[in-house]
Image (spheres, rainbow, N blue to C red):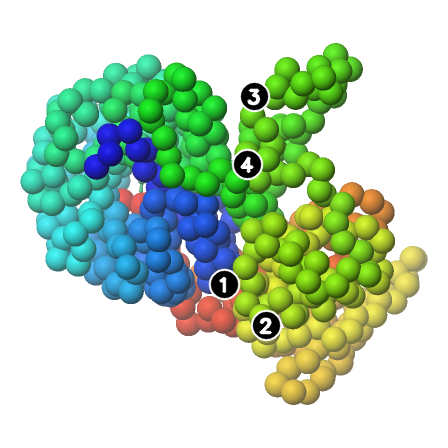
Amino acid sequence: MNQDKIIIFDTTLRDGEQSPGASMNTEEKIQIATQLERLGVDVIEAGFAAASPGDFDAIDKIAQRVTQSTVCSLARALESDIKAAGEAIAKAPKQRIHTFIATSPIHMEYKLKMTPDEVIRRAVDAVTYARTFVEDVEFSLEDAGRSDMGFMKEIISATIEAGAGTINIPDTVGILMPNEVGERIAELVDHVAGRAIISVHNHNDLGLAVANSLEAVHKGARQIECTVNGLGERAGNAALEEVVMALKVRSNYYGNLHTDINTREIYPTSRLIATITGIEPQPNKAVVGRNAFAHESGIHQDGVLKNKLTYEIFRPEEIGLDLNDTLVLGKHSGRAAFKDKLAKLGFAPSDEELNSAFERFKELADKKKEIYDDDIRALVTSEMTNIEKTYELVALQLMDSTGGVPSAAVTIAHEGKEITDAGIGDGTIDAVFKTIDRITGHHGRLLDYRVKSVSQGKDALANVTVKVTFNDNEPAIIGHGLSLDTMLASARAYLGAINSYLSMEGMLKIRNSDSGGTV
Ligand code: KIV
Ligand code: ZN
């Protein structure tokens, strides 16, 4: 193992999916995994196979698609979880099982109700069993940030002995300061003495996840677990783009430490994930935020015009952001120009996806004068992540609601037939969604509704994201809809959620956390 290489372990599809409102359907996860591979991440944590049949299915499909990156599934230190993980990743050329158990006194006593000795035995059994499926096993000490160093050394030695090649030290609750992380990692690296790779997984509750991860590699950790746009449970995880760019920009500080990330894929990856999850990075977010290269003050603008490096520590092109090329195609652009643009934006659609995306682009270009990169990204992403459309919106008509009762007439295609119905509601959206419920026979409860303009201008595309539950005992479903008309985008988003639900029906169940720890 090259001692200077930092392994990038991406957990956007697992910890990132635990961000409130970030659940994704299988097609979307495959699309993201494909992009993560293009980005050059070493390990893709594709999910938690035992959490639900839907998670299992997504990992299995990703395992069949991804060839360069290692595909990993999380598993509690339970036989059933490890078996599910082993089976879900079985078709991947490079496979890893990531098993974990909590090691802090508070978690062992109150959550696991296990003694430290029992925890060690369970961890050793888990690693030993995981090794019957794969050679590459990672063991995590959940809540390591609040665990006793002596106990950690004991369980680390025992799990390495059982066959773990990577030992992950998560600060699960994001409580540690950078120097504390540094001291603990230095001591554990010393203890492990080359028998395994030390990894870190920092949460951002105090805004220190990136700083803590960088301090850890400075002190000998050689794997960073992170997510694109810093998504993740609560305040999120260390942001992949920030750790990677910090290591690159400050290579004078970090010496030969490097990653294999193709930094030019950072911006396209960030946009893909924001489009799919509907969660935009904050405008002033480091590296990928909308304002990351915006210079507002006159003095700064003057400096940048003379030499960009006066106020920019790296060039936008290094992360794949071409600021001079945002105004793109128009209605006279042909298929070849469109295809070329997609390639520049990092998309590699199949012929079928290209055809339907081009058709939608032409329709859009008829109505919208200026089409931007973000419009193209949104359009193509929605084509490429389309699950089978059991129901398809054909027409939507809204009756004038000023002063009257809001009502909607909806036509939907289903199994070769068109069905039309009309209904009323407390508001226009309510009327549209209730009418769709009547036609499809699926009654969703709307948990969240968000509308975002894809680019600038009054004629911007609206990207609507809905979060709906069709059964309170099952995970919520996300639907996306794209249109120049917000109501049409809303209807598409809601029908998208119904189609997603139907594609996953029978594969959904509650993510339980009976024993061995939650994630
Ligand atoms: O935060 C955490 O402890 C985790 C583990 C499962 C690695 O996500
Ligand atoms: Zn985590």
Tell me: 423 left or right of 43.
right
Q: CA distance from mark 1 to mark 3?
A: 37 Å
Quadrant of image for the C terminus: top left
Residue tagged 4 = 319
Name which residue lies at 17% across and 41% down: 165
Report the amino acid beneath label 3.
Ile
Q: Nearer the viewer, mark 4 or mark 1?
A: 4
Q: Quadrant of residue 392?
A: bottom right
Which callout, 4 or 1, points at the residue further toward the start of the chain? 1
What secondary structure is found at the residue carrying circle 2? helix
Mark with earlier residue (1, 3): 1
> Dots 1 and 3: beta carbons under 8 Å?
no
Q: Which mark is residue 313?
A: 3
Residue 197 placement: quadrant: top left
Q: Earlier in the sequence, mark 2 or mark 1?
A: 1
Q: Is residue 277 left or right of residue 66?
A: right
Q: Decide if residue 180 is in sight here.
A: yes
Mark found first going from the N terminus, 3 or 4 = 3
Q: Are marks 2 and 3 in contact (CB under 8 Å)?
A: no
The amino acid marked with disc number 4 is: Ile
Identify residue for label 1.
Answer: 27
Amino acid type, label 1: Glu
- Amino acid type for the residue under numbered disc 2: Glu
Label 4, label 1: how far apart the Cα atoms are: 25 Å
Front disc: 1 or 3: 3
Most distant residue in the bottom direction = 416
Q: Which residue is mark 2?
A: 352
Instruction: Work out how far the residue at label 4 is from the one at label 2, CA to CA, in angstroms.
Output: 29 Å
Name the residue nearer the viewer: 194 or 168. Answer: 194
Q: Is mark 1 within 8 Å of ligand 1?
A: no
Residue 333: image x %, image y %? 77, 60
